[in-house]
Image: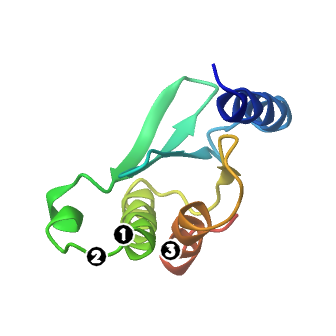
Amino acid sequence: MNKKEFQRSRAKRRVRAKISGTGERPRLSVFRSNKQIYAQIIDDQTGTTIASASSKLESIASKNAPKLETAKMVGVLLAERAKEAEIEQVVFDRNGYIYHGRVKALADGAREGGLKF
């Protein structure tokens, strides 16, 4: 594991020690790779994923938008799916990533879609 991965894993452990998702307020977890971004809403008490969205979905991938705009679209789509599951409030889990760039764009998109952090 290189230094960057090690630092992210430590930050991830610190964040996860403080937050967890419940049935009323689940956790919105973000994973970002070099090309894609994934997000899911998780109820940690039951260990189930309630809603998910990613930049690999055909409706988003076909638009060929820049990564920042794609992340925002993923956030809006996730918020729509959360509303279908009757979820309005979530706890944001940045998963060890810095709250900047694509992670921030996804969060802003989710807020635009109606989720409350």
Q: Looking at the image, which residue is at 55% across and 71% down?
A: 105
- Checking the image for residue 112, the label placed there is none
The alpha-carbon separation of the residues under discs 1 and 2 comes to 6 Å
The CA distance from mark 1 to mark 3 is 10 Å
The image quadrant where one finds the C terminus is bottom right
Q: Which mark is residue 109?
A: 3
Question: Residue 5 at what x, y percent from top left?
Answer: 65, 30
**Foreground: disc 3 or disc 2:** 2
Tell me which numbered mark, 1 or 2, is placed earlier along the sequence.
2
Q: Are marks 1 and 3 in contact (CB under 8 Å)?
A: no
Q: To which residue does mark 2 refer?
A: 65
* Colouring convention used in this rendered image of the protein: rainbow
User: Is 107 placed above or below 1 here?
Assistant: below
For mark 2, does the 10 Å Cα neighbourhood hold few (<14), some (14 to 19), or many (20 or more) residues? few
Mark 3 vs 2, N-terminal side: 2
Image spot of residue 102 (x, y percent) = 53, 64
